[in-house]
Amino acid sequence: MDSELLIAPETIDRTAELIEQRRSLRSVIGPFLNAFEFRGAGAVQGLLDAVRLVADIYRTGRRRLPDKPPLRFRAAVVAAVRTARRSRRARRL
């Protein structure tokens, strides 16, 4: 029975799981982000700008994003997710 569980396709909806955990994450994410100083080179600057923005939102209690939030990192994140998915599919074959 255990071996069947190991090879069975994943049936857990990770998005639903994250939404379920949102309440607990929300209480710790602000202090977590504000406890560290995140630094990096130019390649990650867009992501760092977004992290700083989220930290600022939690610190100030603001409920609205700016009109032009930093999204330069988005293309790289989407590419990384796609690559990870392809790798997982290839390992299953």
Image (spheres, rainbow, N blue to C red):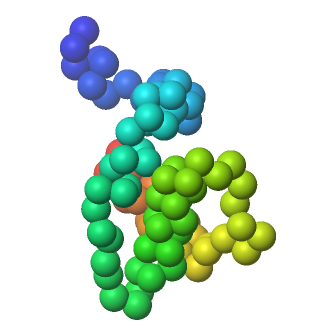
- Can residue 90 be seen at all in this image of the molecule? no
> Does residue 63 appear to the left or right of 15 in the view shown?
right
Q: Is residue 32 above or below residue 79?
A: above
Outermost residue on the top side: it is 1
Of residue 55 and residue 24, the one placed in the foreground of this image is: 55
Asked if residue 13 is positioned above or below residue 92 in the image, the reply reads above
The structure residue drawn at horizontal position 64% and vertical position 52%, both measured from the top left corner, is 62
Count of numbered circles in the view: 0
Residue 3 or residue 20, whichever sits in front? 20
Q: Position of residue 23 (x, y in %)?
A: 51, 28
Instruction: Give the answer, above or below, for where 56 lies relative to 63.
Output: below
Q: Give the percent coordinates (x, y) of residue 21.
A: 47, 28
User: Can you see residue 55?
Assistant: yes
Identified at 37% across, 25% down, the residue is 8
Q: Above or below — where is 17 with respect to 40?
A: above
Along the viewing direction, whichever of 11 and 70 lies nearer the viewer: 70
Res 42 → quadrant = bottom left
Farthest residue to the front: give it: 60
Please indicate whether residue 36 sits to the left or right of residue 19 in the image: left
Question: In screen coordinates, is 26 left or right of 8?
Answer: right
Q: Position of residue 35 (x, y in %)?
A: 29, 56
Q: From this viewpoint, which residue is outermost toward the bottom?
A: 42
Q: Based on the displayed image, in which of its 4 quarters is residue 7 positioned?
A: top left
Which image quadrant for residue 87?
Answer: bottom left
x, y percent for residue 60: 56, 54
Q: Residue at x 47, y 58 (%)?
A: 55
- For image coordinates 25% across by 9% down, the residue present is 1
Q: Residue furthest right?
A: 67
